[in-house]
Every structure is written in structure tokens, then in C-alpha cells.
Image (cartoon, rainbow, N blue to C red):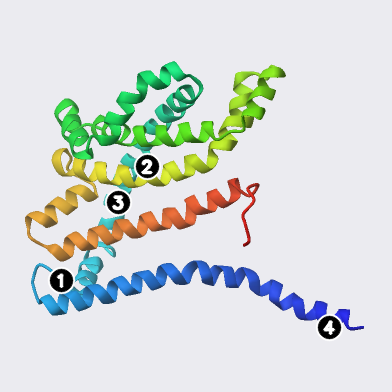
Amino acid sequence: MTDVPMMRAATPRRRQMPLARAVRAVLPPLAFCLVVIVAWEVMARVLASPLVPDVAEVYGELLRIVPTGAALQQIGVTLGRILSGSVLAFAVAVGLGIAIARNRLLAAFFEPGIILGLTVPGLVWALLCVIWFGVSWKTPVVAIGLGVAPALTVSVVQGVRAIDPDLIEMAHVFRIPRSAQLRRLWLPAMVPFLLSGARLGFSLAWKVIVLVEIFGLSSGVGYQLNSEFSSQNVAGVLAWTIAFGVVMAIIEYGMLQTLERRLTRWRRVSRV
């Protein structure tokens, strides 16, 4: 008789668990944003400088660019360029990373190039691509590919080397085709590393594309930032940065993290 009330009492808790998880997931980021806003407002009032606009001025600039659709249009242009360059970087990184992880000679051959690619600033790739290709769709795509591919290659190499050697040997003994090994063994094991590489790649691509749009293009968020900078509109610079940051946060929380949870459900997470 005592078991039934206990089971009934446990049911509401189970129903509340998804809501509790959602609250725990949403509150910390919101709290961080609130702290940043309050800290910025305090700094703006203490400094009382036109170079540090207060929250109301930045909000006014957001109202100027968002409702008119200008922000979404320019952000869409920039995201399209980031996506194109990221696809190129991923294609190069996956193929090269698997080859490097599986072949010591190739690893030794490409190591200097990867180190060089990791150390070269995005500004250099932006300037070179503007010089080489001018105002062309190739400029942002190649610049992002050159700036992002080295870091993604390192992630892929780490993912391949993290695969259990026994599984690789078993696949070799049973003569499983290379294509099947790639689909069933290597790619599933590399998913966490590819997703972490995607986050890193998006952040790097954003930094590269802004420079490309500033120096060699006439559209996109980078071009708008340069325009606001030329007119000494600090609030406008912050408004464009915040607008793009919100879109990137939506992609991170709404797409990448959801995709990561779905693709890595098989991984065991410690509860202690």
C-alpha cells in the first residue's frame, strides 16, 4: 500500500525534470549577459566618454539596423561566405587529417605546413586573398579555408588517433572495405572532435571574414563595421557586433549543441 503513493509522488518530479534541465541550461548564459550589460553601463557612466556609449545608445543603434532588415541581410551575406569557406576547410581537413593520422611519413611531411598555418594570422590570409582574387567570391572562401583548415586538421588527427586500435585491427583482419571503415568506424568516432572543430572553425572564420570584408568587399558585417568605424560611431560598431553575436549564439545553442547531443548519445557521462 505504501508503494502506490510513493510512485504517484515521483511522477511530478519526473515531469519537472526536463523543465529543470531547461532552466539550468538557460539561466547561466542569461545571468552572464546581464552581468556584462550592467558592468558596461557602470563603466560608461564612470568614464562619461563619447567613445564608450551607454546601453541606451547601443540599443538605439540596434533598433536602427534590426527592424529595417539591414542587419539580417548583411548577416546572411556574411554567414553564406562563412559556410562556403567552412565547407572547403572541412573537406580538406577530413581528408588530410585521416591521411596524416594513419601515415607517419605524411604526418612528418605536412607537420611544418600545419604549424605554419596555425601561426599565420587571419589578417595575412585576408590581405593575400584580396590581392590575388580582388572583389570575387573566391576571396572569402579561400581566405576562410586557409585560416580554418589547419586547426580543423589537428582536430581530425586527434579524433582518428583516439579510435581504439583493437577496432582498427579487427576491421583489417575482417577485410572491411575502406569506405565502410570510414562510414562505420572513423567518422562516428570523430564526431565529438569534428563538432568541437566546428565551433573553433566558426570563431576563426568569423575573424577572417570580417577582415576580408573590411579590406576587399562591399557588403557583409565586416563592411558595415568598417563603415561605422569610419564615421566614429562606436555604438554602431557595438550594435553590429551584438547582432551577429546573437545569430552565432542561436547557431551554437540551437544547432551545434543539439546536434552534439543527438550524435553523442552513446557516450557515457560520469554522474559523480
Query: Where does the image place residue 108, in percent across and percent down from the top left?
Result: 38, 20
Disc 1: CA contacts within 10 A as few (<14), some (14-19) or many (>=20):
many
Quadrant into which the C terminus falls? bottom right
* Mark before the other along the chain sequence, 4 or 2: 4
Please tell me the numbered disc located at residue 53.
1
Which of disc 1 and disc 2 is earlier in sequence? 1
Q: Which residue is mark 2?
A: 201
- Which amino acid is tagged 4? Pro
Mark closer to the chain start, 3 or 2: 3
Are there few (<14), some (14-19), or many (20+) residues within 10 Å of tag 3?
many
**What is the crowding at mark 2: few (fewer than 14 residues within 10 Å), some, or many (at least 20)?**
many
- Residue 92 visible in the shown view: yes
The residue beneath circle 3 is 75
Observer-nearest residue: 227 or 97?
97
The structure residue drawn at horizontal position 60% and vertical position 49%, both measured from the top left corner, is 262
Query: Which comes before the other along the chain, label 4 or label 1?
Result: 4
